[in-house]
Amino acid sequence: TTVGRLLAEKLCVPFVDMDNETEKLAHCSIPDIFRMSGEATFRKLETMAAELRLAAPGGFVMASGGGFPVSEENRRIVRTTDAVVFNLDVGVEEALRRVRGSSRPLAADKDVFCRLHAQRSAIYSGFCDLSFDVNGIDPKTVAEQMAGVLESMGE
């Protein structure tokens, strides 16, 4: 999210956070969706929010939660657009440090988080157009690198 905001600012385009889009659609927070209806309902809402947002005209930078690309349907939706997909590759300990204290339901249990990180890693690398190792690199530098790649692609 931090890198996405910085990249959008650098590119002078809107920033879209899929977690926020999903919460708007559901009219409640992600922890509340999980608590009241479970992860499956959250994932359906997340896909609906992605379909709506990605169908809208104009360019933007979109950040997604870690479970978003796990869904084959979400990957298909993104691939029907001209989106360039970046993966910000971070080690499990660094990822855990970044989400510690957040309200992310799937980050509450360290063992579950580590297992999900390992399971999702191959999906992320297979889905993205370009992967950045961001371990120990400040978000501004990552956003600048991403903007440079987009500029060289003519995006």
Image (tube, rainbow, N blue to C red):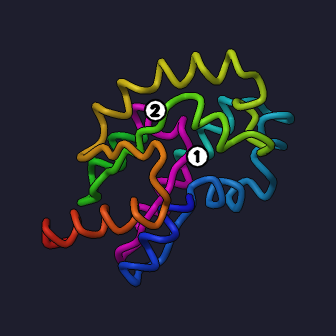
Q: CA distance from mark 2 to mark 1?
A: 10 Å
Are there few (<14), some (14-19), or many (20+) residues within 10 Å of tag 1?
Answer: many
**Horizontal placement of 101 versus 125: left or right?**
right
> For the residue labelled by badge 2, is the local secondary structure a helix, a strand or a loop?
loop
**Residue furthest front in the image:** 136
Question: Does 64 sit above or below residue 112?
Answer: below
Residue 101 in the image, given as x and y percentages of width and height: 80, 43
Residue at (38%, 34%) from the top-left corner?
Answer: 124
- Residue indicated by mark 1: 46
Spot occupied by residue 36 in the image (x, y as percentages of width and height): 86, 35
Reading the chain from its start, which is encountered first: label 2 or label 1?
A: 1
Residue 43, horizontal then vertical, whole percent: 60, 37
Nearer-the-camera pick, 13 or 44: 13
Residue stretch in magenta: 48-73
Residue most toward the left? 153
Asked which quadrant contains residue 104, the reply is top right
Q: Residues within 10 Å of mark 2 (few under 14, many from 20)?
A: some
Does the stretch in magenta take in 114?
A: no
Q: Quadrant of residue 40?
A: top right
Which quadrant: the C terminus? Answer: bottom left
Amino acid identity at mark 1: Glu
Q: Report how many numbered discs are placed on residues in the image.
A: 2
Q: Is residue 45 left or right of residue 107?
A: left
Residue 64 highlighted magenta (yes or no): yes
Residue type highlighted by circle 2: Ser
Residue 139 drawn at (x, y percent) = 49, 60
Provide the secondary structure element on which disc 1 rests: helix
